[in-house]
């Protein structure tokens, strides 16, 4: 079984996406749990491997890579038995890339909305709430045209979006009612039926949040 080092944290949506794809591909992961809020990503030794001071980061032999979107694509190209999660067909792949790029903006909106309640420092403003809703409405439009995020097949984009969108509910369940997004709900049901890892990682995320509540910074 191939193996990589993965710096991440189960509470972090982009880290979960990278970990899920590695597990899906049967890659053996040496998981180095990393705590951004404790300042671990800004330590000189971490900045050497990831100058952007974010998790996730992977190390594959002499090669280091950061940003969950780059990582999930790399893992499929490097270890996938086929290209179904990240198609080689140039138009299909470009559509996946388009959707991965939007997830960066979606995650930023979601993070800004949840970070105050997560750190128990402040409530999100109406503007941050509206930005988050705007991101979800965009995803709702994507899913009105296709079964999955980047077309009619499950791809790496579904893993990234799933981790991002469920983060809306992790620190403040129901504050934005995800149930009213009918296409997102239909898609969530479908991906749970398509890949059991989604249910497994719901539990992993929930457990990480409980540990965070009990032990403080993640
Ligand atoms: N676009 C990046 C975002 C990663 C990100 O913002 N990770 C957060 C944790 S969820 C982090 O490491 N924050 C620490 C920091 O920015 O210093 C990705 O997808 O990997």
Image: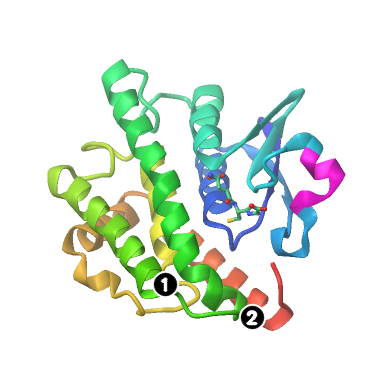
Q: Name the residue that disc number 1 marks.
A: 169
Residue 74: percent from the left, percent from the top?
A: 54, 28
Residue interval drawn in magenta: 41-47
The residue closer to the viewer here, 17 or 164, is: 164
Within 8 Å of ligand 1, the CB of disc 1?
no
Q: How many numbered circles does the render carry?
A: 2
Q: Quadrant of the N terminus?
A: top right
Mark 2 highlights which residue? 213
In the displayed structure, 66 sits above or below 118; it is above
Q: Image quarter for residue 5? A: top right
Q: Secondary structure at mark 2?
A: helix
* Foreground pick, 203 / 65: 65
Q: Is residue 154 magenta?
A: no
Q: Within 10 Å of the Cα at label 2, are there few (<14), some (14-19), or many (20+) other Cα atoms?
A: some
139 or 31, which is in the foreground? 139
Q: Residue at x 49, y 38 (%)?
A: 69
């Amino acid at each position: 079984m191939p193996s990589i080092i993965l710096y991440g944290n189960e509470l972090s949506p982009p880290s979960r996406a990278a970990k899920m794809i590695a597990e899906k591909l049967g890659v053996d992961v040496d998981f180095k749990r990393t705590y951004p809020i404790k300042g671990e990503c800004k330590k000189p030794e971490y900045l050497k491997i990831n100058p952007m001071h974010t998790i996730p980061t992977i190390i594959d032999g002499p090669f280091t890579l950061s940003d969950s979107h780059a990582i999930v694509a790399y893992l499929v190209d490097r270890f996938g038995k086929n290209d179904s999660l990240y198609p080689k067909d140039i138009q299909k792949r470009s559509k996946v890339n388009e959707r991965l790029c939007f997830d960066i903006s979606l995650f930023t909106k979601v993070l800004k909305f949840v970070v105050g309640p997560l750190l128990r420092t402040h409530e999100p403003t109406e503007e941050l709430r509206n930005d988050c809703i705007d991101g979800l409405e965009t995803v709702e439009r994507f899913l009105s045209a296709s079964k999955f995020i980047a077309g009619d097949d499950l791809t790496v984009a579904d893993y990234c979006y799933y981790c991002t969108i469920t983060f809306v509910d992790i620190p403040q369940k129901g504050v934005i009612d995800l149930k009213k997004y009918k296409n997102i709900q239909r898609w969530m049901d479908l991906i749970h039926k398509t890949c059991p890892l989604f249910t497994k990682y719901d539990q992993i995320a929930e457990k990480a949040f409980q540990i965070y509540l009990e032990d403080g910074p993640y």
